[in-house]
Amino acid sequence: MSNLPIFDVAGSAMGAQQVRLSTVASNLANANSVSGKAEDTFRAKMPVFEATPVEGDPALAGVKVQTVTESNAAPLKRYEPGNPLADDKGYVYAPDIDPVAQMVDMISASRSYQANVEVFNTAKELAVATLNLGR
């Protein structure tokens, strides 16, 4: 905990958005992966956030990742008999991941992260300016 809780709030939000960016990157990296069994198919991951009170000031809340959940969407079944991973009927299973939706989520997380960096930097500049008033 810092003397200025704004740093705690902005820092916790940046940490949460970093986890969000990591899960989106993982989802995009595995969007085209296939497997021979539906149960072995990659499942998209999504962080679940929760508000957490800032120590020393109950009026302020930061954010933390409560958990990272996996999608329960059924995998996509594709007929590819030439694929070495195909099952005995010639099917492979791919995750049901929409790359466009993942890119939108990535842009949103990136902008949220950038906004929190600006809050952090502005608070730092104001703290430095306040300290300089005594000179």
Image (tube, helix red, strand yellow):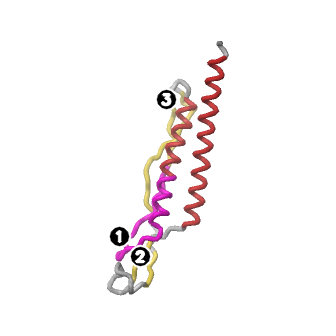
Disc ID at residue 7: none
SS at circle 1:
helix
Looking at the rendering, which quadrant does residue 59 occupy? top right
Which mark identifies residue 55? 3
Secondary structure under badge 2? strand
Q: Is residue 110 above or below residue 77?
A: above
Q: Which mark is residue 93?
A: 2
* Identity of the residue furthest to the front in this view: 135
Does residue 39 appear left or right of residue 130 in this picture? left
Name the residue rendered at 51%, 39% in the picture: 12
Reading the chain from its start, which is encountered first: label 3 or label 1? 1
Q: Residues within 10 Å of mark 1 (few under 14, many from 20)?
A: few
Q: Amino acid at mark 1?
A: Asp
Q: Quadrant of residue 117?
A: top right
Q: Position of residue 101 (x, y in %)?
A: 58, 63
Say whether marks 2 and 1 touch (CB < 8 Å): yes
Residue 83 screen position, x and y as percent: 38, 82
Which residue is found at the position 44% from the left and 65% from the top? 30
Q: How far apart in space, not on screen, are marks 3 and 1 (Cα)?
A: 43 Å
Q: Amino acid at mark 3?
A: Glu
Q: Is residue 42 magenta?
A: yes
* The quarter of the displayed image where residue 128 is located: top right
Which class describes the residues within 10 Å of circle 3: few (<14), some (14-19), or many (20+)?
Answer: some
Res. 40 mark: 1
Which residues are drawn in magenta? Answer: 21-48
